[in-house]
Amino acid sequence: MLSEWSWSQRSLWLPITEEQTEQQYIDRTKRRAHFRAENKELKRQDQYVQKLRDAQIEPVYITNQLAEADGTAATIAAAATTSHTAAAESSTATVDTVPRQCAALTRSFTSRQCRVPIDWSALPSSLVPATHMPAARAARKQHQLQNMIDALRALLQHLELRRTTANSPVRPVVVDFCCGSGHLGFPVAFLFPECDVILLEHNASAVARAKQRLSSLRADTGGAWSNLRVVHAGLQHFDEPFDIGIGVHACGWLSDIIQAKCFQQQAAFLLAPCCIGKLRLGEGLQISLPLENGSTPSHVTAASARCTCGKQATASSPPPVRSCPLLHYPRSALYSSVLTLDQYLLLASKADYSDSSWDFSSAAATKGHAYKAFCEWDRCCAAREAGYVTALTKMNPPDCTPKNDVIFGIHKARWKEQA
């Protein structure tokens, strides 16, 4: 065990010398206590993972590789069908599964029809990451956007559109929740002109940048981009009808609020969650979560902190809320039958790790990805219990971001067979 420790960890257990000051002794004692507590938590987290596995709960990822041949596609679809059925059989709740649709969604996701490389040279220069980011970061960002757009294309192939009273189809509405300045939403509006795109963001400076980008694009194209608009509002205040909700690296519970709002409207969802450790309220970051009646839990306060993805997160007491889902953890009845709230939040607290070194092979990265996989699978199970056809995958290449898990799904009531 000592061989795996860093020198700073080993030094905690070296003999205390007379040369050490009283403050050094106190600091060292505190560090020892913290190290012991952290080890105890890791052991408990491993025990909770084993409890889930004993209940036959295991995250199942579909491949994010292009299916080159029919045989490969058939194998992928069969694996998706098996995972969907196994999740239903292991659940203690009633889950109306549709494994055939799950296999079809997986086939679409891995097909050439959905894997259309983005021609960045065709996009306006202001939408190309390489024009305003360092080269390495821009390359990673373009991979992230490509993965999200591939999954969005698969969802659109199987999404039954809403219809007017005259039975004519309504243009699909895509909401980019927590959009920032629109790194994903603008390319979506450009590549899918048949969709109406809403960029939703609560941060005033990000909204200002998005509106400036939109104004510049409209000026350069003579008033085009009519299918995109920017809305300055928080998640809890958005109450418009929509067909697909997307969110890239919406921190912690924000991804769950996006998914829950999709549940409310039986809308499809596409999420790349991050900062799951923030689910453990009361440590690091606390936030006022609005309830359905507009009140806030008495045990939660507002504060601010920097999350592991490097974004600055803030919270404040929200004004009266029209529509906001009440969150509970674990998200699914299946997980709730195995883990308590405290156990789940402890597991989630280690589902993130520092990405400053981008060392995907480190012990911390391996542990973090394993814990995160179980948390993302909980979200998939919650969706399946709500009547969704879902899939869990990783971005390709996986090292384009440490937060590389992607969840997407369509409600069975909105399912359409591919033509």
Image (cartoon, rainbow, N blue to C red):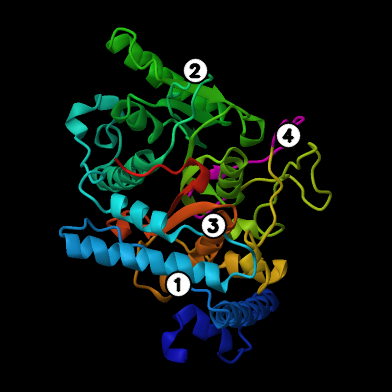
Identify which amino acid the numbered label 4 is placed on.
Answer: Pro
The mark lying in front, picked from 1 and 4, is: 4
| Main SS category, magenta section | loop
Separation of marks 1 and 4 at Cα, in angstroms: 36 Å
Q: Nearer the viewer, residue 86 or 136?
A: 86
Say whether disc 3 or disc 2 marks the residue closer to the N-terminus: 2
Identify which amino acid the numbered label 2 is placed on.
Answer: Ala
In terms of image quadrants, where is residue 331? bottom right
What element does badge 4 sit on? loop
Separation of marks 2 and 4 at Cα, in angstroms: 39 Å
Say whether disc 4 or disc 3 marks the residue closer to the N-terminus: 4
Q: Is residue 261 above or below residue 62?
A: above
Instruction: Give yes or no for residue 164 being in the magenta stretch.
Output: no
Q: Is residue 80 left or right of residue 111?
A: right
Identify which amino acid the numbered label 3 is placed on.
Answer: Arg
Q: Is residue 155 above or below residue 18?
A: above
Residue topped by disc 1: 364
Q: Which mark is residue 318?
A: 4
Q: Is residue 130 left or right of residue 371?
A: left
**The residue stretch that appears in magenta:** 306-323
Q: Are marks 3 and 2 in contact (CB under 8 Å)?
A: no
